[in-house]
Image: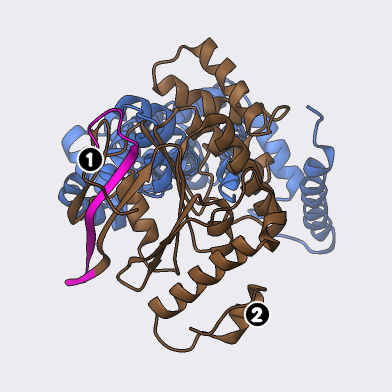
Chain colours: A brown, B blue
Amino acid sequence: MSPSTDSIHDPHSAVGLRVTDVTRTFHRGGVDVQALKPVSLDVMKGELLTIVGPSGCGKSTLLQIMGGFDTATTGTVSTPRGSVTGPSRTIGMVFQRATLFPWWNIERNVAWALRCGGVNRRAALDRARELLDLVGLSGFETAYPNELSGGMQQRAALARTLSLEPDVLLMDEPFGALDAQTRELMQEELLRIQQVAGTTIVFVTHDIREAVFLGDRVVALSGSPGEIALELAPGLARPHTHDVMRSKEFLDAYEAVWACIQTGGRRGPVVAASSAAAGSTVGTP
Amino acid sequence: MRFPVRKILSPIVALFVLLGLWQASSLIWTFPAYFYTPTEIGSAWVASLDANMWQATWDTLFRAGVGFLIGTILALPIGAITARLRRVENTVEPYIGFFYALPKISLLPVLVVWLGYTDTARITMIAISVFFPVYVYMNAGVKGINPDYLKVASNLGAGRWTTFRDVLVPAAAPMAMAGLRVGLAISLIVTFATEVVGQSPNGLGRIIQDGFIAVAYSEMYAGIIMFALIGLAIDLALRLLTRNSRTLWGEAELA
């Protein structure tokens, strides 16, 4: 959905986060490298938007700009609260690696986030335990990050970010480092948590299956510098599990995104092996 | 906590085997008088344990300890600040680089000219020598902090002081501790040098040097053993401290 004309500053706006003509140019060794062509998009409140694209398409850069961790060269990012000028508690970020603080157990990690928001010690610990329970980690509250598997660490990191009760939750390939089974479990878990918490989520991934499975709406970035090449709503019945991957809607959406990325990325034939590995019927563009 | 018998046993066995071979070799060959056997060194050390020796040990410990503390107290914050503030680092880095490679002990004559053959000169010398390695470790430790930790802190709205206390300090602690261990070893080395070259009237360095000059080798060996025991004790204490305070969380990095 391209940005509509209604004001985002209206608190009743259905738009949770608006990106307007954002570009990003890096200066490397005296050379300007453009990472993002002008990108505009609206993230609707309560929506799970996935952004998918090959490595180097600028999807992570876009997400960093959305979260205020990086500054757009031109263009703006705004929420109903105002424009995004730096990191804040209203836009939570889950990183590719869990980045929990290894000197505290996970309960204290989550509680610290709450303490930073002014919650008192007692209440912060109680709330931390509730959140760890929500992400399926009850019984592990006093475990240290290095005692947990990658998937459990990422759950704890998610709990920490959810503790902010952010207006928008940004996720930067959060399941990229996990093994295939854990990743599928985490994807279903994320959908469950989003149903419970109703958070607006922007989820970046290079995995088309993940993007189509999770996204209410999928935005495909292509090329380098990146630009929006496709936008679609897979229209999968919700709630759903991985069984949906055999449905026609899923396969159609998958195929559309795949075809778009193939033509939009580096032009030329894509290695056949990667389409075989994807395990799907991919039409030649 | 169970006493780690196996861990302690193997170095002790190795020690006794080595000392045994050394001792046994003295039964086969005849060594010159200055070449002591382990039992001779041991009994020399035991015999040396009088008030004089304890006083010397204390004098040496005092110099090393005060010098180490001053050097460390300066190096930790300065190392952290230069790691975080590019401009400050650019300003001081050339000077640090100049002094870092300089054999610090070469400054001792200068200090003696300024301050005389005093403990002030000796302790200043020790503090300067400790400062540089601790500075370098601390600087690298703070620079090496996972940038995502700081992103997380800013995302969670942690203030400057909270970020410093709860994120920067613990994240840099393992490297800082490594720096302290290096600094401690250096403080003992330099203390010996300042006691000998700096004409100290007392201390273990004096005992060793006097024993050497007076051909009283049992004194010399006793002083050396005492020095080694001090180093061993301090290093063990530091390692125990590190273990108990869970400072070694470096391995948690692998996510």
Total marks drawn? Answer: 2
Magenta stretch: residue B53 in it? no
Q: Where does label 1 land, which residue?
A: A6
Question: Helix, strand, or loop for circle 2?
Answer: helix
Q: State which chain disc 1 sits on.
A: A
From which residue to which does the magenta span run?
Answer: A7-33
B131 versus B99 height, above or below: above
Residue A250 image point, x, y percent = 61, 61
Query: Are labels 1 and 2 on one chain?
Result: yes
Farthest bottom residue in view = A269
Q: Which of B26 and B121 is in front in this view?
A: B121
Residue beneath the point at 77% across and 61% down: B30
Residue beneath the point at 40% across and 43% down: B190
Look at label 1 and name its amino acid. Answer: Asp
Q: Which mark is residue A276?
A: 2
Residue beneath the point at 54% across and 64% down: A253
- Please tell me how crowded label 2 is: few (under 14), some (14-19), or many (20+) other residues with Cα within 10 Å: few
Instruction: Give the left or right position of residue A57, taking residue B96 as reference.
Output: right
Residue B227 image point, x, y percent = 55, 38
The N terminus of chain B - image quarter: top right
Look at label 2 and name its amino acid. Answer: Ala
Q: Earlier in the sequence, mark 1 or mark 2?
A: 1
Chief SS of the magenta region? strand
Residue B231 image point, x, y percent = 56, 38
**Residue A88 in view in this figure:** yes
Residue A262 image point, x, y percent = 46, 78
* Labels 1, 2: front one: 1
